[in-house]
């Protein structure tokens, strides 16, 4: 109070004591582990500003967030607090792409590399499978890619996979991995996982590069750490010299991306790696009313695999959480439109209302009802703009022009628009270029290259090559005018214009126009080369280009809602098989992740939370019966109002999954006298089991040969049943 400047400190004043303490910790590893809405993101933002004010150069701070959108918002806030400080705020992928663009030349690779999305990766894998002479019906490219993804996320490189795997199928996959990796290198391309792995390997194993970047970036902050994978963690750990000045924040109860390789145990790993780390817990929730917070806390408390935490709020209890059941999805959608009107009449703003669903398919009836009621809406992240054929084609043209080694992009456009270059000729071009040891773009520009081809193919290829050469004269144009030249000289725009006249659908043509607008914005706002533009576009998600619409309600999937907040949240389709989703609900692990997803959705709501389900839902064009999600029982009764005839079946939730787990788990069948093995304590003999029934929540007492008697909870015991035991 004596210090008047403190009373007006825009960086520290808006923080509570716990947040302020965490801000004051300016050196050493820091872990902020706290529930939803407790101000983790605010803390990170203000901590950055505080460091800058303290004299840490902005350019030596890297903050990593989960989406480009979150990064942009953080950048704006930091800017407001300390001005343009040059802090790097990005996603892991954007940071790695920028890093590689700068450092690839150091190791003899071109910085104009292509970034392959999942579809490009799949196209490349199909080629690899073909080259290996395997049957794609048996050796499914997507499955192999999934396997490779798991290796990469665990930082297992191709040679290592080949060394370690012994089974025939796994070895085949490892061999495909090695070839896929080589093919990526040959095409001068990286897929999404590759961006992370390559960046990590360069920083970790190349002393010169590593040292340079470790000097350049001294402080790293990671938000939403619960959804990072091993490679991402390793990257920031190495960068900060074993975690010195590394700050991670997150919430294990919001870990919802394990299906993409995120490892929620990352917090445990971090704390084990850094026993000296300061651990901060935030418990005051600033987002939601009391009733919403309590309901969300009750739900997540049903997860068994978690550390309990107690959140509290100073906010009032507020309105009751509504749980409503309907006859069918149409009735549900109409009711939502009506509720939007009702809340508006109460003075709530439509732009702060959102509808969340488990899968995109659920949005259709809602969209219809909103249109019918004249309520504007935006679907956040559902446009898939960059997956559209015309946008991908245009991107392929640009990528091939920027990166002459990019065979996948070339294969996409060689005969688009149709110019009489058949599949066989396309393959021959790629093979010939490889045999001649040249990049395919250089090969194509060589007039003598097609001498051995049949006359028709030669003519078509020569015409194509001439178009490429014509474009070579315009490479110094800014990006948007260059794209217009490409559209013009390749006749690609005319192709869609003609199609539009025939089919009456202008969409693809307009999408091309939108893409050019994107490039114009790039030229105007930041400028840069074509590869710069492509790198940026490759990592944009649909979330990043959701148009702003005045007075619109937002619609999005639960996964997309992470980190966001709205006054009013409608959570629809909370039904068995949808949430929990049928794909994930059969294992305790999957079931609990679904519950976390539900919890994430609930905790986005500030003032009103409406949760709905229907007795029948149209799926794949047909109405099917639906039943309420077991999660609805877990919301509880206090501060909750039920409408419709949702049945409450306390205790039912998830038991199936848990029971199955316990049936399958040999530990559940453990008996006194059984020999066991523990990774830390070695071998021992079970003395007794304590607790009711046969579940994994019982305690087991074990006499270890070297460590003596220990009591462990079966579920977390890490015990292995020794193989010499017969069951
Ligand atoms: P999530 O887990 O959902 O990502 P979070 O922990 O990152 O949430 P924030 O988004 O930072 O939480 O904060 C939630 C809300 O509470 C925001 O509206 C934020 O502005 C507000 N808030 C955070 N800290 C404080 C504080 N000390 N005083 C007042 N409001 C706060
Ligand atoms: Mg946050």
Image (tube, rainbow, N blue to C red):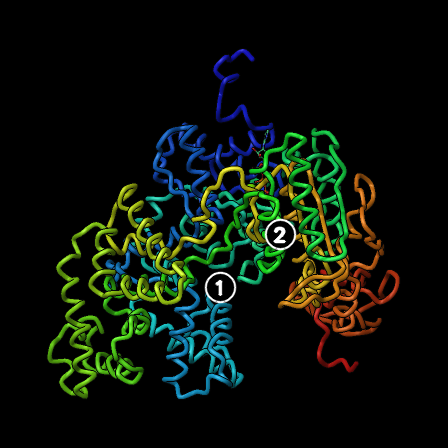
Question: What x and y, as percent, mark residue 380?
Answer: 52, 49
Quadrant of res 720: bottom right
Between disc 1 and disc 2, whose residue precedes?
1
Residue behind label 2 places its C-beta within 8 angstroms of ligand 1: no
Q: Say which element carries label 1.
A: helix
Quarter in which the C terminus is drawn: bottom right
Eye-nearest disc, 1 or 2: 2
Which residue lies at the image location 21% right of the left edge and 71% below the top edge? 441
- Compare residues 264 and 453 and report the one nearer the observer: 453
Question: What x and y, as percent, mark residue 218?
Answer: 39, 42
Which residue lies at the image location 58% right of the left edge and 53% below the top edge? 557
Quadrant of res 375: top right
Question: What x and y, as percent, mark residue 223?
Answer: 51, 45
Q: Say which element carries label 2.
A: helix
Residue of label 1 = 153
Instruction: State left or right for residue 633 relative to residue 580.
Output: right
Residue of label 2 = 366
Quadrant of res 663: bottom right
Packing grade of label 1 (10 A; few <14, some 14-19, many >=20) is: many
Which residue lies at the image location 43% right of the left edge and 28% below the top edge? 81
- Name above or below for residue 375 compared with residue 3: below
Residue behind label 1 places its C-beta within 8 angstroms of ligand 1: no
Instruction: State left or right for residue 114 relative to residue 598.
Output: left
Packing grade of label 2 (10 A; few <14, some 14-19, many >=20) is: many
Rendering quadrant holding ligand 1: top right
- Compare residues 214 and 530 and report the one nearer the observer: 530
- Name above or below for residue 165 compared with residue 301: below
Instruction: State left or right for residue 592 relative to residue 426.
Output: right
- Name above or below for residue 696 compared with residue 336: below
Is residue 508 visible in the rendered structure shown here?
Answer: yes
């Amino acid at each position: 109070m004596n210090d008047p400047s403190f009373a007006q400190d825009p960086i520290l004043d808006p923080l509570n004591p716990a947040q302020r303490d965490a801000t004051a910790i300016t050196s050493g590893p820091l872990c902020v582990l706290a529930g939803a809405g407790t101000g983790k993101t605010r803390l990170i933002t203000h901590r950055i500003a505080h460091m800058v004010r303290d004299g840490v150069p902005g350019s030596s701070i890297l903050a990593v967030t989960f989406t480009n959108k979150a990064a942009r918002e953080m950048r704006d806030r930091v800017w407001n607090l300390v001005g343009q400080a040059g802090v790097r705020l990005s996603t892991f992928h954007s940071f790695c792409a920028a890093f590689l663009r700068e450092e690839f030349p150091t190791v003899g690779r071109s910085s104009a590399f292509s970034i392959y999305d999942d579809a490009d990766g799949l196209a490349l894998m199909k080629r690899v499978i073909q080259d290996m002479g395997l049957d794609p019906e048996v050796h499914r490219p997507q499955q192999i890619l999934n396997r490779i993804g798991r290796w990469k996320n665990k930082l297992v490189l191709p040679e290592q996979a080949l060394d370690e795997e012994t089974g025939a199928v796994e070895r085949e996959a490892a061999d495909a991995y090695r070839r896929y990796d080589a093919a990526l290198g040959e095409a001068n391309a990286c897929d999404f996982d590759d961006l992370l792995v390559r960046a990590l390997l360069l920083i970790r194993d190349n002393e010169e590069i590593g040292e340079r970047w470790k000097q350049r970036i001294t402080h790293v902050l990671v938000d939403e750490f619960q959804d990072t994978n091993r490679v991402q963690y390793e990257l920031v750990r190495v960068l900060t010299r074993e975690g010195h000045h590394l700050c991670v924040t997150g919430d294990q109860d919001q870990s919802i991306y394990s299906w993409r390789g995120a490892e929620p145990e990352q917090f445990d790993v971090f704390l084990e790696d850094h026993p000296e780390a300061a651990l901060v817990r935030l418990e005051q929730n600033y987002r939601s009313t009391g009733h919403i917070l309590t309901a969300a806390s009750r739900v997540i408390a049903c997860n068994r695999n978690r550390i309990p935490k107690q959140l509290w709020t100073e906010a009032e209890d507020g309105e009751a959480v509504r749980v409503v059941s309907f006859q069918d999805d149409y009735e549900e959608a109409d009711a939502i439109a009506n509720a939007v009107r009702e809340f508006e009449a109460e003075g709530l703003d439509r732009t702060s209302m959102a509808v969340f669903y488990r899968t995109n398919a659920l949005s259709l009836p809602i969209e219809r009802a909103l249109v019918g009621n004249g309520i504007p809406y935006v679907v956040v992240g559902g446009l898939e703009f960059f997956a559209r054929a015309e946008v991908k084609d245009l991107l392929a043209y640009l990528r091939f022009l920027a990166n002459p080694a990019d065979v996948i992009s070339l294969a996409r456009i060689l005969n688009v628009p149709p110019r009489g270059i058949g599949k066989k000729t396309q393959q021959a071009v790629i093979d010939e270029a490889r045999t001649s040891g040249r990049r395919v773009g250089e090969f194509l520009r060589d007039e003598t290259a097609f001498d051995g081809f049949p006359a028709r193919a030669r003519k078509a290829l020569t015409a194509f090559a001439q178009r490429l050469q014509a474009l070579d004269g315009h490479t110094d144009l800014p990006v948007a005018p260059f794209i217009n030249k490409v559209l013009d000289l390749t006749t690609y725009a005319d192709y869609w214009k003609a199609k539009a006249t025939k089919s009456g659908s202008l969409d693809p043509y307009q999408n091309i126009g939108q893409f050019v607008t994107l490039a114009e914005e790039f030229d105007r706002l930041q400028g840069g080369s074509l590869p710069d533009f492509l790198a940026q576009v490759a990592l944009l998600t649909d979330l990043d280009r959701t148009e702003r619409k005045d007075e619109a309600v937002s619609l999005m999937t639960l996964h997309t809602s992470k980190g966001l907040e709205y006054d009013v949240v409608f959570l629809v389709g909370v039904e068995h098989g949808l949430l929990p989703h049928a794909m994930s609900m059969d294992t305790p692990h999957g079931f609990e992740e679904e519950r976390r997803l539900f919890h994430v959705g609930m905790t986005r709501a500030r003032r009103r939370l409406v949760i709905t389900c229907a007795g029948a839902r149209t799926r794949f064009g047909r109405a099917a019966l639906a039943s309420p999600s077991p999660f609805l029982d877990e919301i509880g009764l206090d501060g909750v109002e039920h409408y419709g005839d949702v049945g409450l079946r306390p205790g039912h939730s998830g038991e199936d999954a848990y029971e199955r787990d316990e049936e399958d788990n040999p530990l559940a069948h453990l008996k006194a006298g059984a020999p066991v093995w523990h990774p830390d304590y070695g071998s021992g003999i079970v003395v007794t089991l304590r607790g009711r029934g046969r579940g994994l929540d019982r305690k087991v007492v074990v006499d270890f040969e070297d460590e003596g008697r220990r009591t462990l909870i079966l579920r977390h015991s890490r015990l292995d049943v020794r193989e010499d035991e017969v069951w």
